[in-house]
Amino acid sequence: MASTIVSERLTLRPWRLDDVDAAFAIYGRPDVARWLSPAMDTVSDRDAMRLVLQQWIAEDHRGSPPTGRWAVELTAERRVVGGVILLYLPPGGEDLEIGWQLEPGAWGRGYAAEAGHATAHWALQQAGVDELFAVVRPANARAAATAERIGMEWVGETDKYYDLRLQVYRLRTGDLDRPLPGRTYGADRHSR
């Protein structure tokens, strides 16, 4: 089961079935899901979202760190505004991907970078991972900028994953303490 990760403003915790409405507000949005295909399509309704959450929860229970899926919750409001993943990329499951999605109303506030950095910090320091990758479609400037705010470095383009031409960003353990330009969020407090 995924650990709970806490940062300055966010609590990243395992998904629950009672998150269905919040999850649908994220993954039911075509402007969010268009960047996730073919790994995930837009979720059509709340019943479909409930099935997806059931699948994620079951996978999370069967999996072992560092993989997992987390709901991104605003700690002060106890409101879910997004999701973060650490999953092995196809084909072969050799490279560990970090990914993030937020409801559009939460865009532009630094939550994706904060959640991504907290998750990366946990994976690289607590779970013993050596490196993480983010794969970004070339037209997704918002995701590329977030990867850079997390501290990831662009390493090139590839069509290795999902049979798509993707930009690849990497973060290694030694990159964690490097000063990040434009960082507007606090350091990770702790993880449980």
Image (cartoon, rainbow, N blue to C red):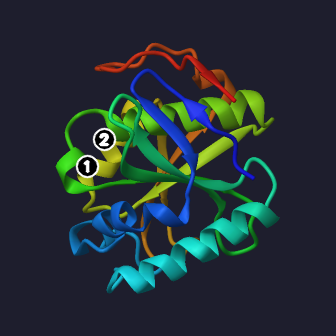
Q: Element at badge 2?
A: helix
- Circle 1 residue: 142
* Any part of residue 163 in sight: no
Q: How many marks?
A: 2
| Dot label at residue 145 | 2
Find residue 47 and report its horizontal and vertical position in percent.
42, 85
Asked if 133 appears above or below 6 in the picture, the reply is below
Find residue 176 and report its horizontal and vertical position in percent.
58, 22
Quarter of the rendering containing residue 79? top left
- Residue at the spot 45% in from the left edge and 13% down from the top edge: 179
Find residue 94 and report its horizontal and vertical position in percent.
75, 61
Q: Label 1 vs label 2: CA separation? A: 5 Å
Q: Amino acid at mark 1?
A: Arg
Q: Residues within 10 Å of mark 2 (few under 14, many from 20)?
A: few
Left or right: 3, with 73 as reference point: right
* Any part of residue 190 in sight: yes
Find residue 29 and report its horizontal and vertical position in percent.
25, 71
- Residue at the spot 70% in from the left edge and 49% down from the top edge: 2
